[in-house]
Image (spheres, helix red, strand yellow):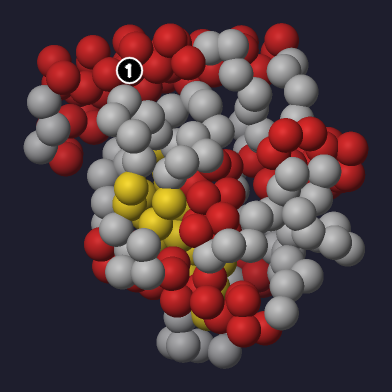
């Protein structure tokens, strides 16, 4: 299966639980409550940032969760996208985010970038993954629009045009997660790519042991 990434932060509900803010899919920003490390469903990393910065990022996440902006998917890194302190999203027309770039833009909105985006290369296999994602969105678009009240015709046109962003660099979810475990930020591709592969191997091994 594919990997996924979000931002976990203290929700002040229970000492051993967190809230998880993540872009689950097209136009589907979610806040999952009472997520615990003990569940074994997640790998957790605390970025090596000052405590006041981590608190500021958590505050920004709470604001975004309150606003619940409609976030479409997009293939580019969308460097001009940002979230105001009140959680309002600003992005150029016709652009969107993935689960990975959502996390990156939250951090960069707080002026603490996680990665050195310019160090990532184009990888042919990522264009294949972008095509798979586009087809998956189309397959579920009618249900998504019915749930959100969006126009199916308009969203179908938007999804068709997502391919216009290709070819473009993709920062994978596991690479964003791996950045949070690096000794210095922002982290580079040379640091995050092998660390990301190691994370995937860990998840695969954990899943295999469960099937046991």
- Could you tell whether 204 is left or right of 92 in the image? right
Instruction: Tell me if I can see residue 139 in this picture.
Output: no
Residue count near mark 1 (Cα–Cα under 10 Å), binned few <14, some 14–19, many ≥20: many
Q: Is residue 59 above or below residue 41?
A: below
Q: Is residue 205 above or below residue 7?
A: above
Q: Which quadrant of the figure contains the N terminus?
A: top right
Q: Which quadrant of the figure contains the C terminus?
A: top right
Residue at which label 1 appears: 159
Q: Is residue 207 above or below residue 127?
A: below
Q: Which quadrant would residue 128 be assigned to in this image?
A: top right
Percent coordinates x, y for residue 74 in the rendering: 43, 28
Picture residue at 76% right of the left edge, 54% below the top: 186
- Could you tell whether 17 is left or right of 161 in the image? right
Considering the numbered disc 1 on the image, is that residue within a helix, a strand or a loop?
helix
Q: Nearer the viewer, residue 190 or 81?
A: 81
Percent coordinates x, y for residue 155 in the rendering: 22, 22
Q: Which quadrant would residue 55 be assigned to in this image?
A: bottom right
- Could you tell whether 211 is left or right of 128 in the image? right
């Amino acid at each position: 299966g594919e990997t996924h990434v979000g931002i976990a932060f203290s929700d002040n509900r229970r000492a051993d639980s967190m809230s998880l803010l993540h872009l689950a899919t097209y136009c589907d920003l979610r806040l999952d409550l009472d997520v615990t490390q003990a569940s074994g469903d997640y790998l957790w990393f605390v970025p090596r940032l000052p405590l006041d910065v981590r608190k500021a990022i958590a505050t920004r996440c709470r604001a975004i969760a309150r606003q619940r902006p409609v976030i479409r998917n997009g293939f580019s890194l969308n460097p001009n996208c940002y979230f105001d302190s009140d959680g309002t999203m600003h992005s150029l027309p016709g652009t969107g985010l993935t689960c990975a770039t959502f996390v990156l833009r939250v951090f960069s909105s707080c002026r603490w970038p996680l990665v050195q985006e310019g160090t990532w290369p184009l990888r042919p296999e990522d264009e294949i993954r972008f095509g798979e994602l586009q087809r998956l969105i189309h397959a579920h678009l009618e249900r998504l629009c019915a749930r959100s009240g969006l126009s199916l015709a308009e969203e179908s046109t938007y999804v068709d045009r997502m391919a216009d962003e290709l070819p473009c660099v993709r920062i994978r979810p596991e690479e964003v997660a791996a950045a949070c475990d690096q000794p210095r930020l922002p982290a580079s591709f040379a640091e995050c790519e092998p660390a990301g592969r190691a994370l995937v191997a860990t998840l695969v091994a954990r899943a295999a042991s469960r099937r046991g």
